[in-house]
Image (cartoon, rainbow, N blue to C red):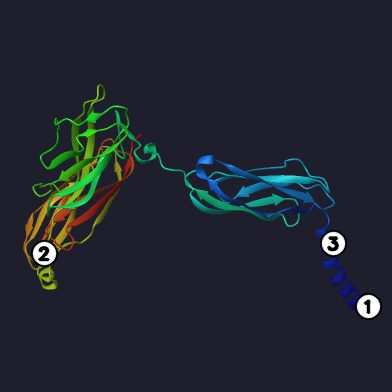
Amino acid sequence: MKFSSLVIALFILPLSYALAQNEGSSIKFNETSFDFGDIKESDGNVNHKFEFTNNGTAPLIVQNVRPSCGCTSTGWTKEPVKPGETGFVTAVYNPKNRPGKFNKSLTIVSNANPAQMRIYIKGNVEPKPRSIEDDYPTVMGGLRVKYRSFNFGKLTTEKPVTKTFNVYNNTDEEISFLDELKTPDHIKVKFSPQTLAPKTLGAIEVTYDPTEIKLFGFKSDLVVLKTTESTNNVKDFRVVASLEEYFPPLTAEQLASAPKLKFDNTVYDFGNIKQGESVTTDFVFTNTGKSELNIRQTRASCGCTVSKPEKSTLAPGEQSTIKVTFNSAGRRGIQQKSISVFSNDPANPTQRITIKARVEIEG
């Protein structure tokens, strides 16, 4: 008898649970996805209202709507929706800076069963035509350029390099470039054309000659030019580059006979130090190659750090050190500084060593 009662109970409990689940609120959307088709970025936001019905027996409450992307915002019926009545969820998509196809979801959180469900929006954004302001956002008087710094990237000492940078006359009058230029000796500047007609593009041609430069690593130079504009006729911009020594292509045999710079350790942590304290460490390195190694130069990433090689020339197999001193005056918290080491190791001419410290302020 007890066994029969147990069997009946095991049958009734799941049935009762299933019936309970079917009671209460129920959310039913007229559609669960919407395709905006082709939309124009220049037209701004687009929106669509998804309507739903409460098919349950208790009031339906939409507690939250979570979009899958920050490009989509939402709105929804905040009041309880009675059985048989309708509500809505609105999806607003912002196409700005999002050209191409999109497919986004919105997760509906409610007191219905199931407690979460998703609806979807999709479409294709046609990008807006680019303007002069988009392509040349930097204003220099009546001229527009892309950047105020002209970046040559990585250069070697092999030969001069020329790059051309566009410039736009944003005025209704001609603008001529004068010959009054202030440039360092290793930089030459030409204009094409010398006189820019109104609302037209021209070019600034910059030639960078690194062959005579003895300073390796990052270099930034100021160039000053003048135009015929009545106001703001003096312009200045930066020419930047990262310089490395040039090594011609070498055979495997030549590489095997070349010098080779190898550090025992490339990172040193001073740990906790007091603000204003100067600390020093030595980085040990060896010429593991078969030719004489020359340390061309060392450059720290910060004026707070000084590096000094014990020797600049090492015979094969010889070992030496680079002394690095960090001055923590005016510094606080976690510090990390690098020192670039330039050598005649053709396989690895630029290497970096790093120091770390945590600067504590007394009191």
Element at label 2: loop
For badge 2, the amino acid type reads: Pro
User: Could you give the CA–CA distance between mark 3 and mark 2, rounded to whole angstroms?
Assistant: 83 Å
User: Could you give the CA–CA distance between mark 3 and mark 1, rounded to whole angstroms?
Assistant: 27 Å
| Quarter of the rendering containing residue 173 | top left
Q: Which residue is mark 1?
A: 1
| Image x and y of residue 75, in percent | 66, 42
Q: Which residue is mark 3?
A: 19
Of mark 3 and mark 1, the one earlier in the sequence is 1
The reply to whether residue 265 is visible in this rendering is yes
Of mark 1 and mark 2, the one earlier in the sequence is 1
Image check: 40 left or right of 81?
A: left
| Image x and y of residue 106, in percent | 63, 51
For badge 1, the amino acid type reads: Met
Image check: 355 left or right of 216?
A: right
Q: Which residue is mark 2?
A: 259
- Tell me the quarter of the image containing the N terminus: bottom right
**Residue 213 to residue 259: above or below:** above
Element at label 1: loop
Label 1 CA crowd tier, 10 Å (few <14, some 14–19, many 20+):
few
